[in-house]
Structure formats: structure tokens, C-alpha cells
Amino acid sequence: MNETDETKPLLSGRSDRVIDEYEDDVKLTGCGATAACDPRQTLHRFLVLILICFLSFGSYFCYDNPGALQTEIKSAMEVNSSQYMLLYSLYSWPNVILCFFGGFLIDRVFGIRFGTIVFGMFVLIGQCIFALGASLNSYTVMEIGRFVFGLGGENLAVAQNTYAVSWFKNKELNMVFGLQLSFSRVGSTVNMNVMKPIYDATSDALPEYKKLAIALWVGSGFCILSMICGLALWFFDARAARITKKGSGETGEVIKLSDVKDFPLTLWLIFIICVTYYVAVFPFIGLGVIFFEDKWDFSAADALLVNSLVYFISAGASPVFGVAVDKTGRNIFWVVSGVVLTIVAHFMLAFTFINPFITMVGIIIL
């Protein structure tokens, strides 16, 4: 595959809905004509990018709440490791198929703006049910909350990506996707390093499940922040549509369920890579704290820190590698390099006693 092939879209026949390509735009005056307020200007688009990046912050913060509070959840709710991992499984199961239908709903039913709010509400309601289950000392309610949370979590990321391709184009996209991932990883990193201190800061006079509930309700607050970003994006996208006279809430693509049969082999290979790669990384992070405590005799704080390194460093590295991919165009090279380094890192974690602060860096090069 040559360099030209790597820059071609996998699906042909798609039109780009980029907001600065319209000739019959509304003429703006006053403050609205400034670079910060004009949706056709780069500064305004990158201000909107801040909202796009924070759109999934709450979702990623709350996704790994169980990982940050693994010991506390198992102790307070009196569950074993298999029952604990259900909190991740119940999130993942609906997303096996719902991400495809979520994208379809955004394109053909809800539109990007309303779809963002719908899936953001699933995330917020699911996290509230999860926290309520801890408040009621009911693990069943917590499991229901994680299932509801999963109905919105990955679909919210689909909406986030749709906003990104609506506001940015061509080689900007790798950098934009890198920044999105960076902010998402910041949410995961913050979660890994603040939830345990929040739990520890609560009164020892409270039952364990009450202390757990307080920490989880904090996560709900971050979901509210993401909802505010979703509402702000609705306003700015609608305003841009009015000014540029583009379709209201459209993605610029005509999507049909029958499109699946036209997906090329290269796209299916990308799907397989993503699935197998995520299987190797995220379940490991879910159980990583106990692993580092048992194998290296780390304290809880050190185990949380090394477990969050994947998120912490990738938060800064993602936009850097996005720019690198933009400049080099060697997409296949970067994918293969990331997979190989991750295999080596897992081998070292499993079969050596090299300091995991070193070996975890291999998993960070995604």
C-alpha cells in the first residue's frame, strides 16, 4: 500500500460537511464578525474543539470508576473478582452492536445535536443509578447503572467524532482526533488518581458502602459537565448552520444499513485490530491495581499511579502522534509499531520483574 493509498478514504462517495466551504454565507457584523465568533474562522473552530474534547470527559472519568475503587467496591459490596468484572462486562456487552446503530441513529434519526444529548443523558442517568446502587448498598442496582451507562458511553464518542468531522477537514483530523483522545485520557487519569483520595477523605464513621457512594456521586458531577458541553455544542453548531446555510444537524452523509456489505476488507481489518487491541489493554487496566499490588508489593497509591500511566502519558502523547501521522502519512507503520510495542510490554509484565513504571510505557505508545 503506497502513501497515496493511505490518505484515501476507505468509503468513497462521501461528501464533507466542512463549514468554511460555503459561498452564500450570511454576512456577519460587529462581535459576530471577529475571529473568535465567526464559525468560518480557525480560531472559532478551535474554541469549539475545546467543547468537543470535553464532551466525553465525564464518560471516560466514570468508565474507570470501578478500576480506581476496585478494592473498595469488592470490600463494601462483598463481591468476588468475577462479580466485580461484571461492572465492565455490562458496559461492553450493549456496545458490541449499539455503536453501529448509534451511528445510524445520529445520521438518520436524531441528528448530531439531539443525538449527543440523548446519549449524554444515558451516561448521566447510568452513573447516577450506579451511585444510587452504592447508596442503597445494592450491587444489583449498581450493575443496572453500568448497563445504562454503557448504552450511552461509546455512542457519545461516536457523536463526538461526528462533530469533529463536521468542523474539521483533511489533515486537521488526525490532530483533532489526537486531542480528543488526549482529553479523554485526562479524564481517565484524573479518575485513577482522585477517586481513592475522595473515598479516603470521607468520615471513617460512615459504612463502607456510604463512603463508596459519595465518591461515585462525584463522578456524576463530571457527567453533568459533559452534558453542559453537549448543550453548548448544540448552540454553536446551530448558529454555524444558520450562518453558513448548511443542513440543520446533518453529517453530510447518506447512511444506509446496506452500506455494511460495501465495507472493504481493509476496514474490516481495522475493526479486528481495534477489538483485539482493546481486549489486551482495557481489561488489564480494570484488574491492574490488584496485579501491581500482588506482584510488585506496591502500595495502593503506587499501584493506582502505575495503572494510570497509560492514560496519563497518552494524554500528552496522543496529539503529538496525531501530528506525526499528519506529517508522515505512514498510518500502517504507526499501527504496526503500536501493536508490536504493546505485545512486548505485556510479555515483560507477565514474565519479568522489571519495574512496571518502565514496561507500562510500551502500552502507552498506542
Image (cartoon, rainbow, N blue to C red):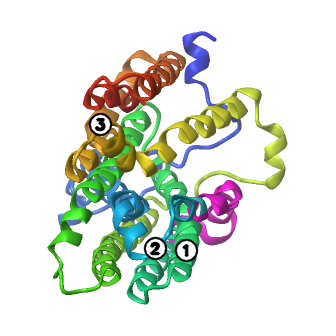
Name the residue carrying label 1. Answer: 143
| Residue density around tag 1, few if under 14, some if 14–19, many if 20 or more, within 10 Å | many
| x 38%, y 22%: residue | 352
Provide the residue span drawn in magenta: 90-113
Residue 320: name its quadrant. top left
Residue occupying the point 26% across, 64% down: 195
Closer to the camera, 155 or 231?
A: 155
Q: Which residue is mark 2?
A: 78
Foreground label between 2 and 1 = 2
Q: Amino acid at mark 3?
A: Trp
Q: Tell me the kind of residue under disc 1.
A: Glu
Task: Give the alpha-carbon distance from disc 2 to disc 1, as whole Å.
Answer: 14 Å
Element assignment for label 1: helix
Amino acid type of the residue that numbered disc 2 sits on in the rendered structure: Glu
Q: Is residue 199 magenta?
A: no
Q: Residue at x 51, y 79 (%)?
A: 139
* 101 drawn magenta: yes
Q: Earlier in the sequence, mark 1 or mark 3?
A: 1
208 or 22: nearer the eye? 208
Spot occupied by residue 69 in the image (x, y as percentages of width and height): 34, 63
- Residue at the spot of label 3: 296
Per the image, label 2 sits on a secondary structure element best described as: loop
